[in-house]
Image (tube, helix red, strand yellow):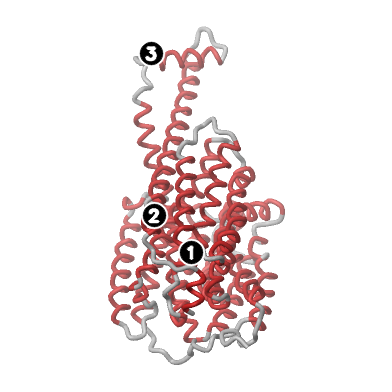
Amino acid sequence: MNRENPGNVNKWIVALTVILPTFIEVMDTSVVNVSLPHIRGSLSAGVDEVTWVLTSYLVSNAIIIPITGWLSSVFGRKNYLLFSIVLFTISSMICGSAPSLEVLIIARILQGLGGGGLQPISQAILLETFPPREHGTAMAIFGMGVVFAPILGPVLGGWITDNWSWRWVFYINLPVGIVAVILTIFCIFDPPYLKRGKLGIDYWGLGLLAVGLGCLQVVLDKGEREDWFESNFIVALSIISAVCLIMLVIVELRSEHPVVNLRVFKDRTFSFGNIIMFTGFFCMFGSIVLLPLYLQNLMGYTALWAGFVLGPGGIASLLIMPIAATLLKRGGRPHLLLTVGLTLAAISLWMMSRFNLDADFVSIAIPRIIQGFGMGLFFVPLGAATYVNIPKEEMGNASGIFNLLRNLGGSFGTAVGTTILSQRSQFHQNFLVEHVTPFNPVFQQRFQEILHHFGVSTPNVVEQKKALAFIYQEVLRQASMLGFNDAFWIFSIMTGLLVPLALSMKTKRSTELAAVH
């Protein structure tokens, strides 16, 4: 009988047990986005008010993820996993039946608290259930959930909302949650080294973590809407977050029983892996947020067709992840596969920076597919390499940190990407407007062509204003297109700069890992 699996449960059943609720939980970070207008109308809420449906979930999620390892050691991993799934499922039911926005937001907070622990717990269980030489396989299974779920979320959420109701976006979690609870009861066991006991509660650490990460997530989610540091609200939260997180580092490094053990960063491979994960998801999620905006705002795509552009990239990731896992299992070096993945991701983003207003569907979909292959080769070897020197006793804590930085990378990427787009579009607009003048012969030529297109030979003031409005709209489109190009180019450079860092990671072949363990 396996010491770390007392019930001797098949590893694939264990994988299904933990990835099922994790997939739904990750998808819930994005599935509600497209339902916000329907929720706002149904609950008579304002635009700013209804966005708290998203922010409340992200805040509670961010707070709970890094302390998952500590909570597992206090209550037992199986007990905590069961509690998380039950809380997530019950709060989903409350979300779906919420009679008011206030009830919905409270339920979303509970849903985030329940779902936050699922990601690090599932990753830790997978890494322990699969032998070291199959850690690539474990990360491929985990990656299918955390990479594909956010892409599927908006498409599924839009379809459910249009065909049923926004409430069913939450109700679909119920059968999955019930199945996950039953599987967890019979298939998940606490490993013997996970000693439950009365640990000293790090009250300072818990408080600083909750306030620091909570404020940070609100800043990232609301910053663009509030015009960043032009808002006193954002400035105050930023200062509070910075002070609390700095104090958190000091307190945790001195605490005998830290709620988040930051000493794992002494391992260079783990540190490099977290930097690469944060920056990689920064660029990936930033681009995934911008791509639908480009398609819908500039190219006239519907939400469904924008989903068709994103979908092939997710499918490409699903196809390449098992291949990456097989290569690792057969002795491939994780850092070399990671380098290939980062290179493909950087190339795809560079191709996106070459988009224009005449691009067709295929020209847009191909870079997205290449990015999907790159992200598959990025996530699997990175997950396998990052934990190579982490002892099993610290796996829960390490996976909590790793997943927190992955989520924060996506949040930072979304916030920074939309800000770059806004500022660079304004910059290009100012530059282009300088050339829209009666003294510019090119402008005069285009102006006359537009009037001729309107069928006007002797234009009056109204017709001239229509032509100028048409030119101004085109200037805005061109400025916005250049803004998208700049944002994708910056993401491409950032991704490319991770390649030397990946090559410097000290990794071992799966056969060497098996020999060590």
Q: Which residue is mark 3?
A: 441
Q: How crowded is the residue under tag 3: few (<14 C-alpha within 10 Å), some, or many (20+)?
A: few
Amino acid identity at mark 1 = Leu
Amino acid identity at mark 2 = Leu
Residue, far bottom: 198
Q: Earlier in the sequence, mark 1 or mark 2?
A: 1
Which SS class for mark 2?
helix
Q: How crowded is the residue under tag 2: few (<14 C-alpha within 10 Å), some, or many (20+)?
A: many
Q: CA distance from mark 3 to mark 1?
A: 53 Å
Q: Contact, CB < 8 Å: mark 1 with mark 2?
A: no
Residue at 55 percent of width and 51 percent of height: 372
* Front position among marks 1 and 2: 2
- Quarter of the image with the N terminus in it: bottom right
Q: Earlier in the sequence, mark 3 or mark 1?
A: 1
Residue 173 shows up from this direction: yes
Q: Which residue is mark 2?
A: 498
Residue 140's x, y, as percent?
Answer: 57, 64
Residue 387's x, y, as percent?
Answer: 45, 71
Which SS class for mark 1?
helix
Residue 285 shows up from this direction: no
- Depicted 309 relative to depicted 509: above or below: above
Camera-side residue: 407 or 210? 407
- Depicted 189 relative to depicted 15: above or below: below
Which SS class for mark 3?
helix
Residue at 39 percent of width and 80 percent of height: 259
Q: CA distance from mark 3 to mark 2?
A: 47 Å
Camera-side residue: 334 or 211? 334
Camera-side residue: 182 or 138? 138
Which label sits on residue 202? none
Q: Which residue is mark 1?
A: 58
Amino acid identity at mark 3 = Pro
